[in-house]
Image (cartoon, grey):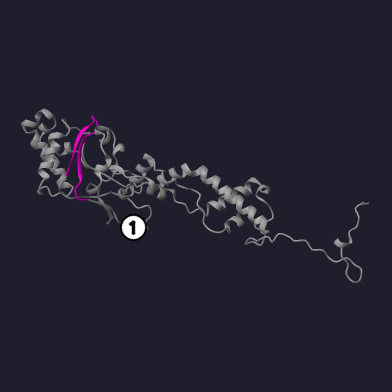
Amino acid sequence: MSNQPFDASKHPRVGDGTFTEITHAEPALTLDQAGGPATAADIIAAGDGPVSLRFVNYDDQLTKDQMSMILEGNWNDAENDVDEVFLENATDEAERIAKEEINAAYEAGTFDREWDDLDEDEKAEARYAVEARDDSDPVKDLLRTTPNQLLRTSLGNPLDRLSAPNGTYGEQLDTGGFEARHHAVETLLKEAGVDTSAEGVTAAIEELVTEGPYNWHSGVQLDVIFYGPIEDAVPAPRSETDCPETASKVLEFARPHLLLIDKYNGSGYDTVLPASLKRTLVRPGEDGSGVSQTGRVYLDDAAGGYSWDDVCGLVKSAYGGDGAPKASWS
């Protein structure tokens, strides 16, 4: 028998002498759509709105590999790679939010347990529900925080346009080699739509031939080099809502910097072309096949062999301004 004293104040009687019914407050549990008690994931899914799990700092940047993926039009690869970088922090943040919202629901009486009372499966489902509300876009944010880059697109290999074999070696410049090389460079420019009769174009070609690589081989190429944002040079939109499905990225240069570079031996020469030039980038194939350097833009230091920065230690911003293209979808 209990030895506790009877407290009549806690057991009031009604007029006939019987005890009144004492009621206890119960948690106002939310019901799921099937009519059963709400799960932790249900509580999270009904939360206050979107959350941001992947925070990009002002000084965060895309890696060289990620930039190359984007410039090749491989958005999915870039997104997956970026997500891997943020995965651990995003998971921790999702769990923090889930714990906070479950404990708040318990305090409000809309859920029957605190976070620490959930089993591991319930915690995981709650975390997944938070992740489903994530509206962060780290790729978009990294494109914004990544500074301009030194970029190139190729007009082709002038060796393939030589009309005479005496243009191959530097010692043959005085015996017809100069004329052969001049013609080869001029041909590549014409194929790119340049008006080679414009004032100053002939002089620019002569500079490249005279001051450029001594011997010509498969590692010598004629490029346009410029300094600008990665996003301007992507060959395919991130989603088809960004532009018409059949649109192509067009780069229009008012005064492009031409670079004749020997990427195997680390030599070359660049000059400003006093004529406009337009390049239409090629979209990557649906089968994932790549595009040659004449159909896309690439990082100077990812072109293969020596970069132009390796060769001369340049000031990258000098290739911006009038040397950078106007980019558009057409």
Q: Identify residue type, mark 1.
A: Cys
Q: Quadrant of the C terminus?
A: bottom left
Residue found at the very far bottom of the displayed protein: 15
Residue 165 lies in magenta, yes or no? no
User: In the rendered view, does 315 fall on the left or right side of 124?
Assistant: left
Height in image: 42 above or below 299?
below
Helix, strand or loop for disc 1: loop
- Residue drawn at (27%, 40%) of the image: 316
User: In the rendered view, does 195 fall on the left or right side of 44?
Assistant: left
Percent from the top left, x then y, of residue 249?
28, 52
Residue 255 lies in magenta, yes or no? yes
Percent from the top left, x then y, of residue 162?
13, 37
Task: Give the magenta part as a residue range.
Answer: 253-272
Percent from the top left, x then y, of residue 243?
33, 58
Residue toward you, 204 or 314: 314
Residue 203 in sight in this render: yes
Percent from the top left, x then y, of residue 224?
22, 43
- Residue drawn at (24%, 33%) of the image: 312
Q: Main secondary structure of the magenta part?
A: strand
User: How many residues crowd mark 1 within 10 Å: few (<14), some (14–19), many (20+)?
Assistant: some
Quarter of the view holding residue 120: top right
- Residue drawn at (63%, 60%) of the image: 32
Height in image: 49 above or below 188?
below
User: In the rendered view, does 43 fall on the left or right side of 5?
Assistant: left
Residue toward you, 293 or 302: 302
| Residue underneath mark 1 | 243
- Residue drawn at (24%, 43%) of the image: 319
